[in-house]
Amino acid sequence: MTTDIRNKPTLTHEDIVALNFIKRPCFFFFRNHYREGLRSRLMQALKPSDITLETRGIIQQGIRRFPVAKPQAMLRIFKKNFSSPQDIQKEIDHYKMLQYYLPQTLYAFSSEFMVDYTAGSKKNILLCGLQEYVPGEAVDPWHENALLKIESILRGGRNGPLKTALENLASFVYHTKKMIVKAGAVPDLAGVGNLIVTPLGAVKLVDINNISKLTMEHHIPVDNKEYPVSDKSIQALYQIETRILNRPGVATDTLYRFFLDPQRVEDVRQIETAFHKETSHSGNYPSVK
């Protein structure tokens, strides 16, 4: 019996090129990305020639070097078993909402596509995306010295790339808040590595499909993994504003006063603790403190 690719613990190049919807010959070499999403499998699409350089090396100035192959794109395979094209459209609409509220410079562009997937004798619908690869390091709003960490990533003072990164982060916060107010929705900012800062100071959201509804209700919503992603995303947004952008005055914002109420924060912490006990994905979201 053929194992559904969404259920395999790890994926290889051979797994991808064996898919019924992949054109042959395939001009890419596929390799697992170092990060594994909760909702999608991530594969690097690499040039075979770059893989050759990475494994065989190249001699430069008398020294053999092994340059790491740079992905040309990221192939995302959604883990969810969609019941219909309409079900998939709802998922794609999340990305469209992000496109509407955020400038393209603030998120990783992706071409989403729906395919008929055959696993053994079974046929069903699969959602995939060929997404822009964003080189860089994670913006970690949970880090105690989040700004210093960004400074160390960019290796600069308060000029050049660092200044650009802070301006882009400020723009990201502005447009995200606008999306929250106008659409009642928030992107997943809680996940570790969902927001990337590049060596030149660009800031891009790479988890582009996980958009959660947000309402000012006392009930704390959770996603299909039982994680309080909406509340944790608001907490992360607050950390970005206070720890990185140095805006302590935002604590009085209506948004933060509601979602950062001490009792609500404690209730969220308990839900988060239960999530980490029940799953093996604690590396995708920050540990409870």
Image: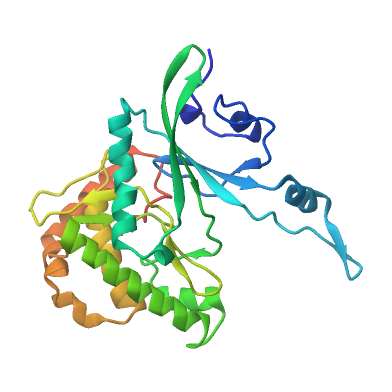
Where residue 194 appears, x then y in whole percent?
Answer: 41, 57
Judge left or right: residue 133 versus residue 48: left
The one of 276 and 208 positioned closer to us in this rendering? 208
Q: Quadrant of the C terminus?
A: bottom left
Judge left or right: residue 140 versus residue 16: left
Q: Is residue 145 visible?
A: no
Where residue 35 appears, x then y in whole percent?
Answer: 51, 49
Q: Is residue 240 above or below residue 183?
A: below
Where residue 280 appears, x then y in whole percent?
Answer: 41, 40
Q: How is the image coloured?
A: rainbow
The one of 63 and 145 positioned closer to us in this rendering? 63
Going 51% across and 29% down the picture, which residue do you hit?
8
Going 27% across and 81% down the picture, which residue do you hit?
247
Q: Is residue 208 visible?
A: yes
Judge left or right: residue 209 versus residue 111: left
Where residue 89 appears, x then y in whole percent?
Answer: 31, 37
The one of 36 and 167 positioned closer to us in this rendering? 167
Q: Is residue 112 above or below residue 148?
A: above
Going 66% across and 30% down the picture, which residue do you hit?
24
How many numbered marks are there?
0
- Residue lying at the far right of the rendered structure: 62
Going 47% across and 24% down the picture, which residue do you hit?
117
What is the quadrant of residue 92 in the picture?
top left
